[in-house]
Amino acid sequence: MTSETTSPGDTQRTVPGPTPAVAACDLDRTLIFSARALGLRVPDAQAPQMLVAEVYHGEPLSFLTAEAGRLLQELAAAAVLVPTTTRTRDQYARVHLPGPPPRYAVCANGGHLLVDGQPDEDWRRQVDAALAAACAPLPVITEHLRKVCDPRWTRKLRIAEDLFCYAVVQRDEMPVGLVAELSMWAETQGWTVSLQGRKLYLVPRPLTKSAAIVEVVQRVGAGRVLAAGDSLLDAELLELADAGVRPAHGELHDQGWNAPHVGVTQSSGVMAGEEIAGWLLDLVR
Ligand SMILES: [Mg+2]
């Protein structure tokens, strides 16, 4: 229904609606935080109210502040909010942000595009073709990771979605220089390394969150891309965005990563998550 009237002879015109913005948001340590990553710097009695964003084995695992939850719901109503994560689909399925489930989500660092919760098969075929053409196959990388990961500081080795692999490590017991050495080797294979919390990831260089977000942008006809993220795997997503924000903690922060169009939060930990939700909402408005 339109309130406009047309007289006979008027050419029917389609008045385009405002183009939506896509807000591509990393999850872990950007919007949601494990208990050990909360980083609260106030007395317990002054801690903000928290929402549980993830339950694992029957216990709460990830959290956000109630205020962040409120801001995210407003953001989801004003923009296309796309959770954009390195999590596998199973790991993502445990995450429940406040509000209705997002229409689009990016999992496995761009390896899967979920549409209404279902993986888009066309997208996955495109990803497989891009990887086959551009980098060493997964078994070569997994074998190398197995060799360098000493059982004394390695808790688990995992293959994710037949796309990439990671080790769960005891970070303070890892040899100094291992990440740098591994990164140099990975570079020669067309792969990249990211250390996030207790997880040491090896990810094919062409497997990116930004490629999947470009696909979402095309599908929804978005005019603007906003992004938030904390790790090296988010750097290219932040670079793609028209405007971005990163928390004052995490891998990018530790490396002093900055870009002119990417803001940095004042706070760190779960309070940075709240700031990020508010920052994205301000930009959408
Ligand atoms: Mg993260």
Image (cartoon, rainbow, N blue to C red):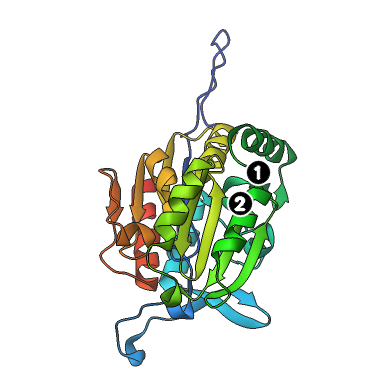
Among the 4 quarters of the image, the one containing residue 218? top right
Q: Is residue 37 visible?
A: no
Q: Are marks 1 and 2 in contact (CB under 8 Å)?
A: yes
Q: Residue 188 got which mark? A: none
Among the 4 quarters of the image, the one containing residue 9? top right
- Mark 1 secondary-structure assignment: loop
Q: Quadrant of the N terminus?
A: top right
Question: Given the image, on which type of amino acid does mark 1 rest?
Answer: Pro
Crowding at dot 1, Cα within 10 Å, few <14 / some 14-19 / many 20+, comes out as some
Q: Is residue 119 visible?
A: yes
Farthest residue to the front: give it: 147
Expressed as whole percent of the image width and height from the top left, the position of residue 27 reads 50, 61
Expressed as whole percent of the image width and height from the top left, the position of residue 232 reads 42, 53
Expressed as whole percent of the image width and height from the top left, the position of residue 246 reads 35, 56
Question: How far is mark 1 from mark 2, CA to CA?
Answer: 7 Å
- Horizontally, is 244 left or right of 221 in the view? left
Report which residue position mark 1 lands on: 137
- Mark 2 secondary-structure assignment: helix
The residue at the point 32 percent across, 87 percent down is 46
The residue at the point 28 percent across, 52 percent down is 263
Q: Is residue 256 above or below residue 198?
A: above
Expressed as whole percent of the image width and height from the top left, the position of residue 112 reads 65, 47
Ligand 1 within 8 Å of the CB at mark 2: no
- Horizontally, is 129 left or right of 16 in the view? right
The residue at the point 36 percent across, 90 percent down is 44
The residue at the point 71 percent across, 47 percent down is 119
Question: Given the image, on which type of amino acid does mark 2 rest?
Answer: Ile
Q: Residue 141 got which mark? A: 2
